[in-house]
Amino acid sequence: MFQEKLNLFLQAAVGTALEEQAAVIRSVTEQVIANINQGDLPRWQDAHQSLPDLSPATVDPDQGPLTVRFSRPLSVEQQHNLEAGLRALHPWRKGPFKLAECFVDAEWRSDFKWNRLANALPDLNHKTVLDVGCGNGYYLMKMAALNPGLLLGIEPGLLHNVQFWSVEKYANTGAHILPLKIQDLPQHMACFDVVLSMGVLYHRKSPIAHIEHLRSLLPRGGTLILETLIIDGDEQTCLVPQGRYAQMRNVWFLPSVAMLTNWLAKLGMRHIEVIDVSLTTTAEQRSTDWMRFHSLPQFLTADEQHTVEGHPPPKRVLIRCQH
Ligand SMILES: Nc1ncnc2c1ncn2[C@@H]1O[C@H](C[S@+](CC[C@H]([NH3+])C(=O)[O-])CC(=O)[O-])[C@@H](O)[C@H]1O
């Protein structure tokens, strides 16, 4: 199915700024697809295939859950099969989605971040947009209402890809996801008007190289939206947690906002604007019926003043800047 999705993307890229890069994207994606470790993938693909064909639907552009409305009410059997197919794609990290009567109450209230992000987005009309580490495509599907020219997400998590296909089967937003890491994209493929990197920088061992790579994907004047974990402090302050951070492995650099904006400026980014700084609350990230593992409440001390490892609790910055 990944090959089929790649082909659909390549068709959509014809006539856009991405057309010239299509051969490179095809080649790197085919290499990644050929090396996919199957694991649970067949089970997830079966769940996706089991989803019922339903009447045409539209996405409600309102704030809140990403809501898909169908032109005809679902039968009891359709409703049951829809919910069973989606539940088989547990755990749902990002959401919430509402498809007919089925409410996918994911671990993250991504609608909270969407409300912060919507203020930061430049005009997307006919623009080419890349969301790096896009999860199950929640923000891509929200951005689709803003009439972009092409929406591409890259996401190495295979379950996220299958969840995206499953919602997109009904939402029909025209967004695309490829199963790539940012490292798979060549540097200097400056064909995106807007690049988003949200929740990825702290997973990168070399955050400056990550920003440089993001910058190289933008032409002069293109917009970068960067969201990441930070700590309080001045331009000399940065946390490099030994061991885990809020039970997450693979967390490298949590700079202060001042240090992060210095990095961006040193790399030549301009018009750097801090749009938002927010503590991540246990209302925004928690276990639900659709994500039954531990979540933020279990990763913080009882008074929520520290992570269980004794670090400052998660706080995130949302920055907009230009190449
Ligand atoms: N090298 C990489 N290249 C691309 N993606 C990666 C890489 N490493 C990890 N990821 C992916 O980046 C995502 C990070 S989550 C943010 C999701 C969304 N953006 C959000 O803002 O809600 C973190 C969070 O929950 O905040 C995961 O889906 C990883 O698979």
Image (spheres, grey):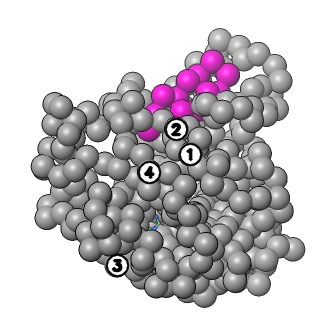
Give the magenta-colored segment's residue range. Answer: 95-108
Q: Mark 1–mark 2 contact, CB under 8 Å?
A: yes
Disc 4 residue crowd, few under 14, some 14–19, many 20+, Cα 10 Å: some
Residue type highlighted by circle 1: Arg
Mark 4: is the Cβ under 8 angstroms from ligand 1? no
Whole-number angstrom distance, CA of label 4 to CA of label 3: 23 Å
Mark 2 or mark 4, which is nearer the start of the sequence?
2
Q: Mark 4–mark 2 contact, CB under 8 Å?
A: no
- Viewer-side label of 1, 4: 4
Residue 229: x percent and y percent? Answer: 36, 57
The image quadrant that residue 259 belongs to is bottom left
Disc 3 residue crowd, few under 14, some 14–19, many 20+, Cα 10 Å: few
Which residue is more in the foreground, 163 or 209? 209
Q: Mark 4–mark 3 contact, CB under 8 Å?
A: no
Mark 1: is the Cβ under 8 angstroms from ligand 1? no
Q: Which image quarter holds the C terminus?
A: bottom right
Quick check: can you spot residue 305?
yes
Image disc number at residue 206? 3
Whole-number angstrom distance, CA of label 1 to CA of label 4: 9 Å
Residue 140: x percent and y percent? Answer: 64, 52
Where is 34 relative to 120, above or below? below
Which residue is more in the foreground, 28 or 206? 206
Q: Which image quarter holds the N terminus?
A: bottom right
Image disc number at residue 116? 1
Residue type highlighted by circle 4: Val
Whole-number angstrom distance, CA of label 1 to CA of label 3: 26 Å
Q: Pointer 2: what residue?
A: 112
- Viewer-side label of 4, 2: 4
- Viewer-side label of 4, 3: 4
